[in-house]
Image (cartoon, grey):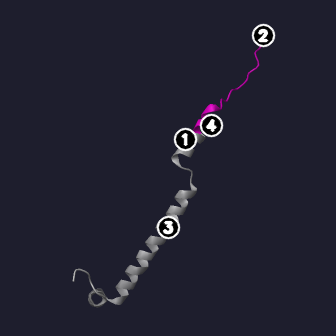
Amino acid sequence: MGSFSIWHWLIVLVIVALVFGTKKLRNIGGDLGGAVKGFKDGMKEASSEPTAQEKVAQNRVADDTIDVDAREKTRS
């Protein structure tokens, strides 16, 4: 008796449909689907970007390079 049967869930679904209406439930479902899709896209972009450790390694390589302007020494 501790778990809900299929009949309990059907009654809950009918009550929710009566309270909110099917149009509003459809909009909520569409919004939820869009949010999930946006989350998945964000996760794909995050995995393609370099990690913090890779960025630090890239900065170390860039910091090791020394730019020097060579000037000709003139004798006076």
Residue tagged 2: 75
Q: Quadrant of the C terminus?
A: top right
Residue type at numbered disc 4:
Val
Q: CA distance from mark 2 to mark 4?
A: 37 Å
Q: According to the image, label 3 marks what residue?
A: 40
Residue at (39% x, 82% y) in the render: 27
Marks 1 and 2, the one that precedes in the sequence: 1
For marks 1 and 3 on the same chain, the one whose residue lies earlier in the sequence:
3
Which label sits in the foreground, 1 or 2?
1
- Disc 4/disc 1 C-alpha distance (Å): 9 Å
Disc number for residue 61: 4
Disc with the residue nearer the chain's start (2 vs 4): 4
Three-letter amino acid code at the position of disc 2: Arg
Upstream in the sequence, badge 3 or badge 4?
Answer: 3
Compared with residue 41, is residue 53 higher up or lower down, i.e. above or below? above
Q: Residues within 10 Å of mark 3 (few under 14, many from 20)?
A: few
What residue type is disc 1 on? Val
Locate residue 6, reporting x and y percent.
31, 88
Residue 36: horizontal and vertical position, in percent?
Answer: 45, 71
**Disc number at residue 24?**
none
Bounds of the magenta segment: 59-76
